[in-house]
Amino acid sequence: MPTTVPTTVTVMASLLLSSLCLGLLASSASGVITVREGDFSVPLEVVKKLKLLLEEYKGVENAVLMAAALCENPGLPAQLKPICHSPNSSTLFTRLGAIAQEPHICELCGYAACTGC
C-alpha cells in the first residue's frame, strides 16, 4: 500500500486549528463556546457569521486589505469590531477565519470530554 505523507501546508493547517482550539472555553452556565484569540474573546456563533462575510472578499489575498474591508463592512458583528482597533487585526481575522471554515473542530473541543484542545 502506498504511504501518504502529509504536506507542509496540511500539517501547518492542522497545527493552526489545533492551537486555535486551545483558546476555546466552554461556559458551564450557558453552554456557549468562546474563542479566545489574543486579548479578544468571541462566541463561536459570531465566528461562524464571519465566514459569510469572508466569502464576500474571496478575491482579496492581502490580509491587511481584507481586514480593512471587514472593518468597514456594516454587517460585521459588534463583538468583532474591537478587533478593528488592534494593530494586528489582519492576523486576528485570518486566524478567526480559519476557525470559521472548520467550526465543527472547535465545537468538539468545547466538550469537557474532548482532550488535547
Image: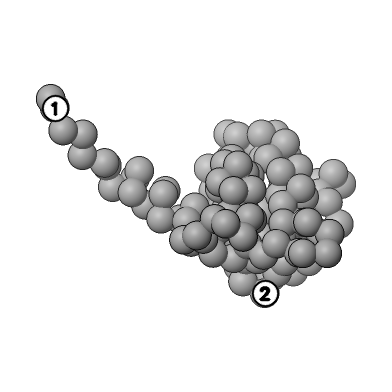
| Amino acid beneath label 1 | Pro
| Amino acid beneath label 2 | Asp
Residue 114, position as x, y percentages in the image: 54, 55
Mark 2 near mark 1, Cβ–Cβ under 8 Å? Answer: no
Residue sitting farthest toward the bottom: 39
Residue 67 visible in image:
yes
User: What number of labels is visible?
Assistant: 2
Residue sitting farthest toward the left: 1
Residue 90 visible in image:
no
Residue sitting farthest toward the top: 1
The secondary element bearing badge 1 is classed as: loop
Query: Which residue is depicted at the point 59% across and 48% down?
Result: 108
Q: Mark 2 or 1, which is nearer the eye?
A: 1
Q: CA distance from mark 2 to mark 1?
A: 45 Å
Disc 2 residue crowd, few under 14, some 14–19, many 20+, Cα 10 Å = few
Residue 24, position as x, y percentages in the image: 63, 62
Query: Which residue is depicted at the point 59% across and 65% down?
Result: 23
Residue 7, position as x, y percentages in the image: 27, 42
- Of the two numbered discs 2 and 1 on the same chain, state the one appearing first in sequence: 1
Disc 1 residue crowd, few under 14, some 14–19, many 20+, Cα 10 Å = few
Instruction: Give the image quarter of residue 78.
Output: bottom right
The residue indicated by pointer 2 is: 39
Query: Which residue is depicted at the point 70% across and 69% down?
Result: 40
86 up-or-down from 45: above or below: below
Quarter holding the N terminus is top left
The secondary element bearing badge 2 is classed as: loop
Pick the residue in front: 5 or 53.
Answer: 5
Pick the residue in front: 79 or 18.
Answer: 18
The residue indicated by pointer 1 is: 2
Query: Which residue is depicted at the point 67% across and 65% down?
Result: 25
Pick the residue in front: 59 or 48.
Answer: 48
